[in-house]
Amino acid sequence: LTAYHFPVVQVVAHYERAVLFRLGRLVSATAQGPGLIIVLPCLDRYRILDLRTFTFDVPTQEVLTKDSVTVVVNAVVYYRVRDPVRAVVNVEDANRATRVLGQTTLRNVLGTVNLDQLLTAREDIAALMQECLDSVTEAWGVKVERVEIKDVRLPIQLQRAMAAEAESVREATAKVIAAEGEMRASGALKAAAFEIKQHPIAMQLRYLQAMSSISSGKESTIIFPVPLDLLSFFRAALNEDPSKGQSPLILNEHLMSEIHASIESLQAAAALSASGTDTSEKRLIDFESIEDTMDQNSQIV
C-alpha cells in the first residue's frame, strides 16, 4: 500500500464545520467537527465552512422610490452560515449569492416605499429587507441576522425645498405660540383692570412703581403726567347741585385743596426719584406753573 491509501487526519476549528463527500456522495446529513476528522485520500473530498458572522456593504446605488424621487442609498448586511450542508449542496457560493441578493433586494424594497417613510422609518424598512433576504437564503443554509440602511442622499433641489418647508412650519408654530401668549396676557390684563377698578389705590401703587423704574434709567428728562383723577374733581364740582346749600366758593376752596395735595405728592415723588439717580441729571416739570393755571381756572369757575 502506498501513502495515498492511508487515512489522513484533518483538524477542524471550533468555529468551523466540514462537509465530507465520499465518492461524490454526502457521507452524513450533518456537518462534521469541530475536532479531528478522518479523510480517505483519493476517495473523500471535503469543504470547510466558517460559521462566524460576516458583513458586507451593499454598494451605493440610485433608487427610485414609490413617489418617483431618485435617492442614493447604501446599506450593510450581517449574515452567517447556519446549515453548512445546505450552503455546500444547494448553492455554488453562498457568500457571493447573498451579496448579489442584497443589492437587488435593496432596490426592490425601496421601490415600494415613499420618501417620507424612507427618511422616518428606516428601522421598519431594514426589518422588511431582512425578512425578504432571509426567506430566500434559508434554502441556502444562510441566516441574515441584521440589515442597516447607512446613508440616504437626496438631490440638492429637494434638500432646499425640504429646508424651506421646515422653516415655514417653524415660523407658523412660533406665530401660534405668540398668539396664545398674547391671548393669555390679555386675559391677565383684563383681570388686573377689574381688580384696579375695585381698588383704586392699586393704580397709585402702579404709578409709583412706574416712576421708580423710569428713574433707574439713564434718561436726562423725566416727565410726570398729571393723574387723571384730577379731572374727576372738576366734574364733581360742575355737577354739584347748588340746592344742597354749598356755595361755589366753598366748592372752589375744596377743589383747590385737593389739587394742592396732589401736586405736593407729585413734587415729593419727583424729588425722591431725582435724588436716587447718580448717573445723569434729572430735570423735573415745573409744577408751580401748573398750580398758577389751576388758580386761574378756579377763579373762572
Image (cartoon, grey):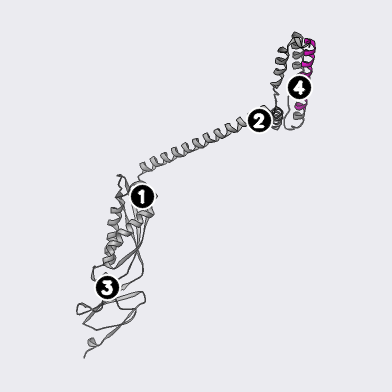
Q: Is residue 18 above or below residue 265?
A: below
Residue linked to disc 4: 262
Q: CA distance from mark 4 to mark 1?
A: 74 Å
Q: Secondary structure at mark 2?
A: helix
Check whether the beta carbons of the residues at disc 4 and disc 1 lie within 8 A of each other.
Answer: no
- Residue type beneath disc 2: Glu
> How many other residues sit within 10 Å of disc 3, few (<14), some (14-19) or many (≥20)?
many
| Residue 233 is at least partly visible in this image | yes
Q: Nearer the viewer, residue 178 or 285?
A: 178
- Residue type beneath disc 1: Leu
Q: CA distance from mark 2 to mark 3?
A: 89 Å
Residue 20's image quarter?
bottom left
* Quadrant in the picture for the N terminus: bottom left
Q: Earlier in the sequence, mark 1 or mark 3?
A: 3
Residue linked to disc 1: 118
Q: Is residue 276 above or below residue 230?
A: below
Question: Which contiguous range is marked in magenta?
Answer: 247-271
Residue linked to disc 3: 85
Q: Secondary structure at mark 4?
A: helix
The residue that appears at 36% across and 50% down in the rendered structure is 118
Q: Secondary structure at mark 1?
A: helix
Check whether the beta carbons of the residues at disc 2 and disc 1 lie within 8 A of each other.
Answer: no
The percent coordinates of residue 298 (x first, y second) are 76, 11
Q: From the image, state whether disc 2 or disc 1 is nearer to you.
A: 2
Residue 90's image quarter?
bottom left
Q: Earlier in the sequence, mark 2 or mark 3?
A: 3
- Residue type beneath disc 4: Ser
The residue that appears at 77% across and 24% down in the rendered structure is 265
Q: From the image, state whether disc 4 or disc 1 is nearer to you.
A: 4
- Residue type beneath disc 3: Val
Residue linked to disc 2: 195
Give the dominant element type of the magenta stretch: helix, strand or loop. helix
